[in-house]
Amino acid sequence: MRAVSTSAVLTFGATLFLAANIFIAIHIYSIYTALHNDAVLINELGLIRGSVQRIANLELQKNSDASAQTIAMVDGVFDYYLRGAGHTSFVHFNADLVQHLHKMHTEWDDFKSSVEAYRLDPECFDAHFALSSAKLWGSSNYLLLHKVLNSDRKTNNIRLLLYYIGFLFFSTFLVLLVVKVGVRTMEYRSTHDALTNVGNRGAFDARLEEETLRLDRSGRPFSLCLLDIDHFKTINDNHGHAAGDGVLKKLAEYMRQALRKTDGLFRVGGEEFVVLAPDTDASQALALAEKLRSIVEQSFAQTATPLTISIGVAQCDTHTTPCDLYKNADMALYEAKRTGRNKVVVFQKKHITVERA
């Protein structure tokens, strides 16, 4: 249940993270598009502002042809923004910008009229020509500076968003790291005995199912060694439960060091342990169990709590179910206890064979 809950939390968190990044990406793209449009408009406003001065100079120089070309170019700019197709639609979402452009366009028309009048009578319309050009230059310069400042704000917004994305990635990495460590800890605790750090009953059941499936595929038998500490209650009664816990820890460590890497060690009861030996028949499991029995006896012989173990061995083949395998090993262990303890007993179908080094 914990694993499912953790997985759901991770999935929910990942979904939120993805949604946040998609939203930020869309927002950054929209700002980038707005910056691009602003850059184009700033260039066009600069063109209008410069054209006013250029036209004035050309008219003063009596160069009407060049002046007419510049006027046509500026007319094209206003047509693009105020009468253009959908590609200039971004302008129409900004009422203030539209208002300024229309105001500038009116001033532009007035400026063109003053240019025509100046050509007809330079002396009479000189003052009006200068006034209209100055007015249009001022309007274009104001809007140009306004758009530059607005673009700077958008650029700062992008910087803030980039900082936020960096923080989001960093914090998410830390959260995922903490969650990953927490999940591993929970998974370890869910499959290992808290006292001895060997596999628990749940891990044993899972490994037994795994070995059974492997047996079905390969036909190679595996064996189970069920072992129990002899007179463990006496140790608890005489030395206390803390000493008994210490004995279980040492026993688990001695056996773990003696087993092969492919073998599985599990604590399935108070003082009861199981060894699953893959690709191992009964005779090979007998040798392994005897090795464990001897190591335990020798390792605890000189301690304050000397002890021995009894082991029941059973082989699992294609005709044996996991339930029968455990029962067979338990019967062999019972026989080892009944016939004197500190020994290994191998289960066979017709009779129990007692073996001891």
Image: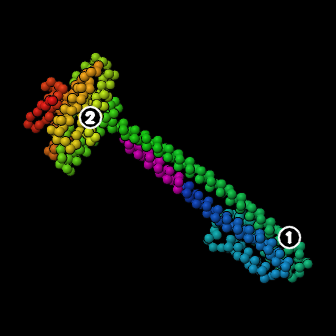
**The one of 341 and 109 positioned closer to us in this rendering:** 341
Q: Nearer the viewer, mark 2 or mark 1?
A: 2
Q: How many C-alpha atoms fall within 10 Å of the one at disc 2: few (<14), some, or many (≥20)?
A: some
User: Which of disc 1 and disc 2 is earlier in sequence?
Assistant: 1
What residue sits 77% from the left and 65% below the top? 141
Name the spot of residue 282 as percent of width and height, x first. Answer: 15, 39
Which amino acid type is marked by label 2?
A: Ala
Q: What amino acid is found at the position of numbered circle 1 in the picture? A: Leu
Magenta region: which residues? 1-22
Q: Looking at the picture, does residue 46 appear above or below residue 123? A: above
Q: x, y (%) of residue 110?
A: 81, 74
Q: Position of residue 71 (x, y in %)?
A: 76, 77
Residue at left 28%, top 28%? 251
Q: Is residue 334 visible?
A: no
Residue at the farthest right position: 123
Q: Say whether residue 245 is left or right of residue 167.
A: left
Question: Does the magenta run of residues contain 15?
Answer: yes
Label 1 belongs to which residue? Answer: 131
Q: Quadrant of the N terminus?
A: top left
Residue that label 2 marks: 258
Question: Is 226 a magenta residue?
Answer: no
Considering the numbered disc 1 on the image, is that residue within a helix, a strand or a loop? helix
Instruction: Name the residue rendered at 53%, 45% in the picture.
Output: 171
Which residue is at the front of the view, 133 or 328? 328
Determine whether the residue tagged by mark 2 lies in a helix, strand or loop.
helix
